[in-house]
Image: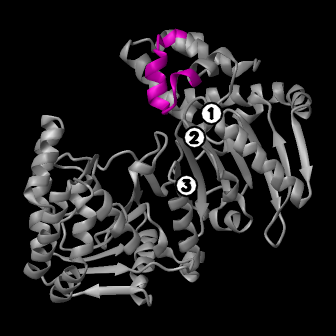
Amino acid sequence: MISGGYAATLKRLITFTQAKFISLAEVVGYDVSYVNKWSNGTKLPSSRYVERINEEMGRYFAELIAKEKKEAAFFKAFPIAEDTDDLGFEIGQYLCAAYRTTLHQNRAPKFKEENSSIQIITGHHDTAAFLSDLLQKSLQNLEEDGELLVLGEFTTLDKAGFWKYFKGLHLKHKLTIRVGLDLGEIEAQPEILIAMYRTLDQFLDLDFTFYDINDTPQANLIILKGSFAVQYALDTQPRFQMCTYIFDKELTWDIYEKFSLTGSETKALMSTVSSLGLDELGYRTAFYATTKFFFYLTNGFEFLLPHEVFDSISDAVSPEQAIAVQRLCVTWEEVLNASEIDFIIPMVSLLRYIDTGYIYLTDIEYNLTADERRAQIQSVLEGVEKNPKLTMATLLPTTSDGLYIGQNLSFYSNYKTGFLKKNKKNLHNNADSFYVISSTRLHSIILAAFQKMKKQPTYRQYTADALKKKYETYKPLIDRTLSLKK
């Protein structure tokens, strides 16, 4: 139980101003449960953000005092000088002083409590086995959406085998993983980007959020919010050689709050969203407001769809979505008729699409009928002939370990920004469907890596005539395949 000046001071201010907990929580940007715990003494604000929290609460209390004209009563009740020019600032400083007092009161006994809640594991094999077992059991048994804060660099951890510890997980709930990324290193070594893409493609049920490693604490910490904290050490290989496992709930929460990236000023390089939105003025509208695109498609081919497909989708969704779908139809017709677009489709993905007809159109999953797939083939042939700036290319199957073998994560770029789209059909929990790239630099790195696929020996690009000839060659096989789908 955290006791002392801070909780009592905060409670006095809340009582005096008649501030509502929910309003105070909105002011500081925390859940109302946190404010309750701060005022009843069960928890302290994170030392990393306490000054900001106290300043914002101080301004809010001052506003309430001024609104109710209670200045005179306040100065009688609290040890703050009446001649102050900035009451909000003084209240914030008053709270900070109370916070320091409470820290001093609780430092010694807390250390004794923590000693019994720490376990140290040493040696490469023992440490690796421990981390794998801990992550598997803890993540598999999540009873609600979870957050794993990894204060380390993605690539270094990948080389140490860390992401392999997530294999075989069957998550029921969403898991957000926050981790650092060294942009300079992946610019210098493109194969690192390949490894990153393959990890995202392999673990569709995980939602990664990437931060510039230079903007994150260098703490070598792995924290499962509300569960445990692990501080680890790597050798030069790199391999895990030692870790300190902390499982005391209160201490784990304190560590999380000190290092949490949520609510801080640290901006993500890339993060997930559940939807890009079909609304008229949303992300999608802004994304297509240009004339040059690059698309790496693994989840079907949702472009150059026949009108009857849009009509069928409209009939199957809500009236609001139907309007948005028809708007999207018009937008794409304009884009496809005038824009410069590179389409690259892995051959394995193309064959899968011919077989299933599955597309993930923004927020809507749809399977084209066999006849609709035949009509789309004609639409594609006509579209390429009408707009010579549309290039169609495939990547043939290969046994090499390159970027282009991914089959469940598509990449969309308008050369200014971009996003990655998961194959929603292969999601097994409530994970988000999209990665939105917020960093211009990271987007440029990813785009360059995908464009380099054009230099692969398995890359095949087709003119309108070549595409028609290729279709005529494989038309009997395509017809037989589609005939099985009726």
Vertical order, 307 against 427 (above or below): below
Q: Give neighbour class at mark 3: few <14, some 14-19, many 20+ (Cα, 10 Å).
A: some
Predominant secondary structure, magenta span: helix
Vertical order, 272 against 335 (above or below): above
Q: Tell me the CA gap for discs 2 and 3.
A: 11 Å
Question: Does the rendering let one see residue 300?
Answer: no
Point 82% across, 72% down: residue: 236
20 within the magenta span: yes
Point 65% across, 42% down: residue: 48
Point 38% across, 73% down: residue: 346
Secondary structure under badge 1? Answer: loop
Q: Nearer the viewer, residue 177 or 406?
A: 406
Where, by quadrant of the figure, is residue 163 drawn?
A: bottom right
Q: Give neighbour class at mark 2: few <14, some 14-19, many 20+ (Cα, 10 Å).
A: some
Q: Which residue is mark 1?
A: 142
Three-letter code, disc 3: Phe
322 with respect to 225 (left or right): left
Colour scheme:
one colour
Whether tag 2 and tag 1 are in contact, CB under 8 A, the answer is yes
Residue 434's spot in the image, x, y percent?
A: 39, 53
Q: Earlier in the sequence, mark 2 or mark 3?
A: 2
Q: Which residue is mark 2?
A: 171
Q: Which residue is mark 3?
A: 203
Q: Nearer the viewer, mark 2 or mark 1?
A: 2
Whether tag 3 and tag 1 are in contact, CB under 8 A, the answer is no
Q: Earlier in the sequence, mark 2 or mark 1?
A: 1
- Which residue range is magenta in the image? 15-34
429 with respect to 486 (left or right): right
Three-letter code, disc 2: Leu
